[in-house]
Image: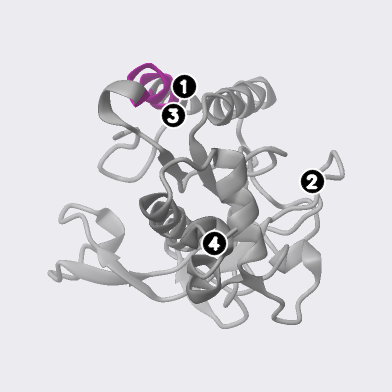
Amino acid sequence: MKVLDHKGNGSIGDVIKGIEWIIENKEKYNIRITNISVGSNKKSDKGKENELLEAVERLWDSGIVVCVAAGNNGPEPQSVTTPGTSRKVITVGASDDSGVVEVMGNITTDYSGRGPTKDCICKPDLVAPGSNIWSCRAINKTFFANSKAMYVAKSGTSMSTPVVSAAAALVLSANQKLSNNEVKMILLNGTEDIGFDKTKQGRGLIKIDKILSSPYVTGEF
């Protein structure tokens, strides 16, 4: 769903409308996974943040696997952005944010949102690579105006989250009968402790080979 403009900006209301469309059309288009690589910032209206959180949790309750970015406001505690603060969804941080990178035009380091949330929920749930990830580039994207390339290296938890969404897709491709809660369990168990505090790495770094060898995926349980 396109909820952002040509500059990458959007409103919480637009994101909620996109979520509502997915819920209404999930059976028609067999939607099983939603990747949300956007989040509220510190200037957001708190009431609207609560509405976004509620919408994302309705999406999860409808049976869809929801993977959400932890945000780029780290490294302070309680810096995970909404809706990554939801207890239900799979919140994804960046495993490799220790180096200096450019995130949305800003030079930064240790950017990945850290837990716990203000409600003492342990977040993020897990991490994936998020720094200098090659992806497609919108031609009219203003902060890539000096480049004519069709692909560009980007950094942020917005890049980490699709890695986990893709892993969820592999799991459901192998076993379509799994619920979103079961997929979440498989993903969390398919991680590796990489030595960071749980407030940064959650359960650890996602390991695709470990996930795909799960007996719940292979059908050997």
- In this rendered view, identify the residue nearer to me: 60 or 83: 60
Badge 4 vs badge 2, beta-carbon distance below 8 Å: no
Give the residue type that dot 4 points to.
Answer: Glu
Question: Where's residue 104, x and y in %?
Answer: 43, 60
Choose the circle earlier in sequence order: 3 or 2: 3
Does residue 112 appear in the picture of this structure? no
- Reading the image, the residue beneath label 3 is 15
Nearer the observer: mark 2 or 1; the answer is 2
Q: How many marks?
A: 4
Identity of the residue furthest to the top in this view: 24
- Reading the image, the residue beneath label 4 is 220
Nearer the observer: mark 3 or 4; the answer is 4
Badge 1 vs badge 3, beta-carbon distance below 8 Å: yes
- Reading the image, the residue beneath label 1 is 13
- Reading the image, the residue beneath label 2 is 117
Give the residue type that dot 3 points to.
Answer: Val
Question: Where's residue 195, x and y in %?
Answer: 76, 82
Q: Is residue 166 left or right of residue 38?
A: left
- Tell me the distance, in whole angstroms, between the alpha carbons under discs 4 and 1: 44 Å
The magenta region covers 18-26
SS state under label 2: loop
Q: Residue at x 81, y 57 (%)?
A: 77
Q: Quadrant of residue 148?
A: bottom left
Give the residue type that dot 2 points to.
Answer: Thr
Question: Where's residue 123, x and y in %?
Answer: 73, 53
